[in-house]
Amino acid sequence: ICLWKDDAVAAFSLTIDDNCAPDHDWWLETGRKYGFPITWFVITDRVGGTNSFNGTWEGFKKLIDAGNDVGSHTAKHLHIDEEGWKDIETEYADSKKDIEENIKGHRCLVLAYPGGPNSKLNDQAIAAKYYIACRSGPAAINQANMINYAGITSVGGINIGNAQFEAQDLLTALEKGRAKRVQFYRGWYCCHFHLVKPEEREKLQKTFETLSAKIKSGELWAGLFRDIAMYGQERDTAKLAVKENAKDKIVLSLTDDMDDSIFNYPLTVKLRIDASWKTVEAVQDSKKIGCRIIENDGNRFALVQVVPDKGDVTISWK
């Protein structure tokens, strides 16, 4: 089972807080151009109000339809002085409910804890009742084998070779032996933005070009925050077994300990194959699933996209 999708070296997610509707079109174009999806964390009580900065539900649905995601940044951003404030559980529960009621068919699965003077009110145990993953404040790469999914760390912006601290540099996750902080190699680099001013957008272009090259090369998996969190939790609890190894096929079983009604993201299974195999096909639950051949150090492998607990996988070749 690959550590990350498609056997990438590391994972990367880009998230945006506080609605920031003036940036939506720019981010949509940027994500399409450079090859990464985006997760917006939304303060739900502000959507559709008199301030256009906070956006509309129609606008957030447009982002989802374009392949992005919308999660919760709570209902009131912990502004306890606002009318209607009750408690932290209501903040988490109501924002999830509002998103799902106003964007039909969308499941709100992730949360970003608000900062500010009332951030001490945030509660990981309560948040875990409503969300599969929550983004927290400390700025560092998430260690691949020690991820706290109720408190995923995030770096402000994207640092590629220019971070003040090794733990906040994407290259620390991508290049083995580059940094003293070896525990962050092959980790998950999550970053966050707020409103991006026009002059800052211009400065980001070179960073996006470098990021895009690493995505296209396959060394970096750029995924939605929710998908990376889902992949990691499935992987951490998965069990892989070979049920049959015949001349013309291999049959695998992949299971995990997660809730199948939510956790349905494919895990990448890497299978060493014979050099004579020209094509490989994989079937799960009577349906073809993603499968492609790669080469590494002169050896050939099949990367098979398998959803845990969805039945045996039969891999055949010609």
Image (spheres, grey):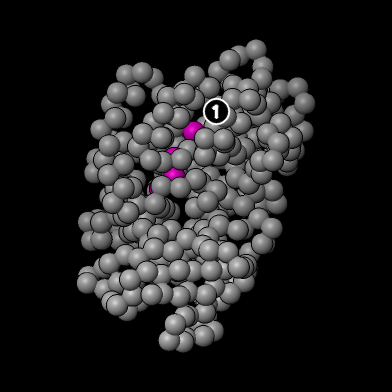
Horizontal and vertical percent for residue 154? 45, 44
Where's residue 55, x and y in %? 59, 21
Residue sitting at x 43%, y 58%: 5
Residue bounds of the magenta highlight: 12-16
Q: Residues within 10 Å of mark 1 (few under 14, many from 20)?
A: many
Q: Is residue 103 above or below residue 318?
A: above
**Extreme residue in the front direction:** 318
In reply to whether residue 13 is colored magenta, the answer given is yes
Please identify the quadrant where the N terminus is shown.
bottom left
Quarter of the image with the C terminus is bottom left
Residue 285: image quadrant is: bottom right
Mark 1: amino acid = Asp
- Please provide percent x and percent y for residue 87: 74, 37
Judge left or right: residue 245 versus residue 107: left
At x 39% / y 51%, what residue is drawn?
221
* Residue 208 higher or lower than 165, as above or below: above
Residue under label 1, please give it: 18
Q: Is residue 252 above or below residue 24?
A: below
Image-quadrant location for residue 284:
bottom right
Residue 40 visible at all: no
> Total of numbered circles in the picture?
1
- Identify whether 113 is placed above or below 198: below
User: Residue 287: where, in percent of width, then height?
Assistant: 58, 64
305 or 39, which is in the foreground? Answer: 305
Query: Image point 31% across, 30% down: which residue?
Result: 204
- In this rendering, position of residue 232 left or right of residue 184: right
80 vs 253, nearest the viewer? 253
**As rendered, which of 316 and 185 lies closer to the eye?**
316
Q: Tell me which corner region of the image, top left, top right, bottom left or bottom right, holds residue 301.
A: bottom left
